[in-house]
Image (tube, helix red, strand yellow):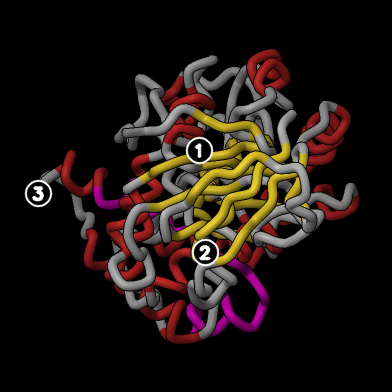
Amino acid sequence: MDKVALTNVRVFDGERLSEPATVVIDGDRVGDDPAGARTFDGAGRALLPGLIDCHVHLTDETTLPALARQGVTTALDMGTESDELVASQRGRAGLTDIRSCGPSATHPASGHAQRMGRARGLVADPGQAQAYVDQRAAGGADYIKIIVDLPGFDEATVRALVEAAHAHGLRTIAHAATRDAVLLAQAAGADVLTHAPLDRALADGAVQRTRDSGEIVVPTLTMMEAIVARLGGHAPVSYDVARAAVEAWHRAGVTILAGTDANQAPFAPAAPPYGASLHHELELLTGAGLTAAEAVRSATVLAAEQFGLADRGVIAPGRRADLVLIDGDPLSDIKAIGSIAAVWCAGVPVEAAQ
């Protein structure tokens, strides 16, 4: 693999863009010595760490190229029935790096199980939680995903899943798209809330409990917006409720990460496109009170820190060379995040999205 010196690039340091500088790609890592490197002129563009989408669902072998072309160099799969598909997509050179939970835990009576014909990951009561988590841990799951889809799980079953996961050193991500689901997931001790409630506002106490417990939130506003658009006035849902929840969490100091729920599942309520939907998610997060820099952090350094990806999320010597070159300044106009000039996944250049 060539050593490449990216010259005249403005590097995002987690807060701001630097003055024009040089970043060295040395193999799959960011290097510190440009000697002998081939030069790539960045022409004053912004250089960001590779973007991390904290909520996707794998479809097939086309998923990772679609993500990579849009600058998403790491993706967290939040539920895929096929262990074989997950295994086949791990560690593919020059493409998006993935983490996965495999089949998520779902109650047999839940809407998810009924609508999507779920055959795996079914957990009916607390007594079945340990076996499910043991199986997922043995299969190499990176975390445990729990579908808190009411009516479905009770608090005791979710708590049993959380405790079993923690015994394996695994974090728990709770699907919680309604107020009552959020409250149940909080009471059971889930580590991460994914989605934002669409039906009823969170009381101040619930917002503060999120902050005090150290829970983090992946609100997937892109998906919540799409669900409301699809349902129109035919269901008691409101995007304004979801946005207000994110605004309240942000004001309270809750850590918010970027995720989209991108998928191509036939029975999903909506299908955000891979990659491009993360650019839209960052726009929506700024519409919910985050600054542009905070939004970019939610898809880079914070996502890496919260999911234990210590080798990425920042541009520094020794870190994985996941890099995105942007035309424009996304800290001044977050929409510029979609103007992709070049992408590198672990030092390997990816075909430009344009």
Contact, CB < 8 Å: mark 1 with mark 2? no
Distance between the Cα atoms at labels 2 and 3?
31 Å
Return the x and y of residue 320 as percentages of the image width and height: 73, 47
Q: Which residues are magenta?
A: 205-225
Badge nearest the viewer, 1 or 3 = 1
The residue at which mark 2 appears reads as 298
* 152 lies above or below 352: below
User: Residue 233 bears which disc, if any?
Assistant: 3
**In the image, farthest residue toward the left:** 233
Return the x and y of residue 38 as percentages of the image width and height: 65, 39
Q: Is residue 328 visible?
A: yes
Residue displayed at 31% across by 51% down: 280
Q: Earlier in the sequence, mark 1 or mark 3?
A: 1
As shown in the figure, which amino acid type bears the numbered disc 2?
Ser
The residue at which mark 1 appears reads as 56
Return the x and y of residue 119 as percentages of the image width and height: 59, 18
Return the x and y of residue 246 as percentages of the image width and height: 39, 71
Is 206 colored magenta in this rendering? yes
Distance between the Cα atoms at labels 1 and 3?
27 Å
* 202 lies above or below 72: below
Q: In the structure shown, which secondary structural element does the residue marked by tag 3 occupy? A: loop
For residue 342, side relative to residue 244 (left or right):
right
User: Residue 78 bears which disc, if any?
Assistant: none
Q: Earlier in the sequence, mark 2 or mark 3?
A: 3
Classify the position of the N terminus by image quarter: top right
Q: In the structure shown, which secondary structural element does the residue marked by tag 1 occupy? A: strand
